[in-house]
Image (cartoon, rainbow, N blue to C red):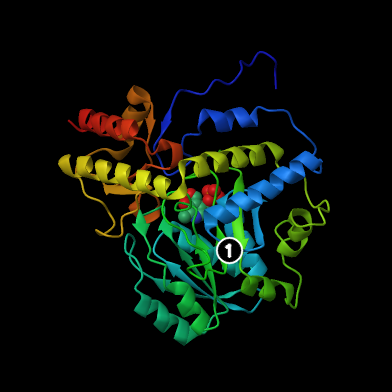
């Protein structure tokens, strides 16, 4: 690159979109601390602390809990490619972009995929899931806890027990829920769970926390064939994140510093207090959204506190409003994805971005722009 280029100075932004969310200064500061080697004893102890913190965050005792080097999609892929062998059947619940993505990943892993579909913005009932499990008898079932494309909050508390009755492994996407709303991996009997760092954990994108139950690990260690992905093979990663500490790949050291610091902020605040903060700010935003005459796309009772998807009022120019929010107010909100493109805005209140001041700011900016 020619040396005449100036240093990159990002525009000041308040990130209220579907992710990434704002990163607290102390997490950014942690990323500016010197590198150590990825097998340095101090880094290995940081990895242990990250694993402990992730267990606390997922509310699990699962030994196999770690941060995959990659974004949330790498977490999704890790869960699926390790559990699925070519020819295995997998049931995927699709009511938005990320359920759909799961079907694509499962097909690429060689699964015979059965899709249970719901219109966008809706959630699945336990009865229809039970019927599909009984019909297809899948080895694994995948479902999204917080569908970022629609703002729908899927009840999942009873799914683990149901899956066990059908001898099915439950895979749960918690990319937009972990750290923002209750996630109880052991209590809910979830077998494989993944998330991402850039939403309610308020780190930059780059790591995907995952956790596997002993049932899932039994399936993984008894596979007939090697995991199709070398990079995401949990058996090999176990030697790096486990006691052996054998080189597998060079961990993104700085991102692990960030995650460690983020976990510290989360436990200083307290998980329950954090969930309550997300809920309070969501309810304040919702009152304002209703006062502006707008409606949520998901039904009452299934609206995510972390991702507020609202219908764009008739006659309003989606792109023009988002551009004005960005240019005049420095606020990023998200447009609609897939079936909701041009029809919905997605206002994220995640992690460090879930603040009273941001609620007032985005509501008053929207009021100005929509006037
Ligand atoms: N799952 C959900 C629910 C998501 O919201 C996202 C990203 O927005 C992903 C998976 C994929 O994560 P990433 O974009 O970090 O790869």
Neighbourhood count class around disc 1 (C-alpha, 10 Å): few under 14, some 14–19, many 20 upward: some
Q: Is residue 271 above or below residue 37?
A: below
Provide residue 338's location: percent of width, then percent of height.
Answer: 40, 54
**In the displayed image of the protein, which residue is found farthest to the top?**
4
> Which residue in the structure is indicated by mark 1?
105
The image quadrant where one finds the N terminus is: top right
**In the displayed image of the protein, which residue is found farthest to the bottom?**
135
Q: Residue at x 71, y 62 (%)?
A: 234
Q: Residue at x 55, y 45 (%)?
A: 197
Please give left or right for residue 255 compared with residue 160 in the image: right
Q: Is residue 186 above or below residue 44?
A: below
User: Who is closer to the viewer here, 188 or 368?
Assistant: 188
Please give left or right for residue 157 compared with residue 196 in the image: left
Provide residue 302's location: percent of width, then percent of height.
Answer: 31, 59
Name the quadrant containing residue 297. Answer: bottom left
Q: What SS does tag 1 mark?
A: helix
């Amino acid at each position: 690159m020619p040396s005449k280029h100036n240093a990159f100075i990002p525009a000041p932004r308040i990130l209220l979109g579907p992710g990434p969310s704002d990163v607290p200064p102390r997490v950014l500061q942690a990323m500016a601390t010197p590198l150590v080697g990825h097998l340095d004893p101090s880094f290995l102890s940081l990895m242990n602390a990250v694993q402990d913190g992730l267990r606390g965050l997922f509310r699990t005792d699962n030994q196999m809990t770690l941060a995959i080097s990659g974004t949330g999609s790498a977490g999704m892929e890790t869960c699926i490619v390790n559990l699925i062998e070519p020819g295995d059947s997998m049931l995927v619940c699709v009511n938005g972009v990320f359920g759909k993505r799961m079907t694509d990943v499962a097909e690429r892993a060689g699964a015979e995929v059965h899709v249970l579909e719901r219109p966008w913005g809706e959630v699945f009932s336990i009865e229809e899931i039970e019927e599909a499990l009984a019909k297809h008898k899948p080895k694994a079932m995948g479902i999204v806890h917080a569908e970022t494309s629609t703002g729908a909050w899927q009840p999942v508390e009873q799914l683990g027990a149901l899956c066990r009755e059908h001898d099915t492994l439950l895979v749960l996407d918690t990319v937009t829920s972990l750290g923002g709303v209750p996630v109880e991996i052991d209590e809910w009997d979830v077998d494989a769970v993944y998330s991402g760092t850039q939403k309610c954990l308020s780190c930059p994108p780059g790591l995907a926390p995952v956790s596997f139950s002993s049932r899932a690990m039994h399936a993984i260690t008894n596979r007939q064939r090697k995991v199709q992905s070398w990079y995401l093979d949990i058996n090999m990663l176990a030697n790096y994140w486990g006691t052996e500490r054998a080189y597998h790949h060079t961990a993104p050291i700085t991102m692990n510093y960030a995650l460690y610091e983020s976990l510290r902020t989360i436990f200083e605040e307290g998980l329950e207090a954090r969930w309550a903060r997300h809920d309070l700010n969501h309810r304040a935003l919702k009152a304002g959204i209703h006062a502006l005459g707008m409606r949520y796309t998901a039904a009452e009772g299934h609206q995510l506190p972390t991702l507020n998807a609202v219908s764009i009022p008739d006659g309003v120019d989606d792109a023009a409003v988002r551009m004005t929010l960005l240019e005049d107010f420095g606020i990023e909100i998200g447009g609609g994805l897939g079936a909701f493109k041009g029809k919905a805005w997605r206002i994220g209140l995640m992690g460090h971005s879930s603040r009273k001041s941001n609620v007032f700011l985005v509501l008053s900016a929207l009021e100005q722009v929509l006037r």
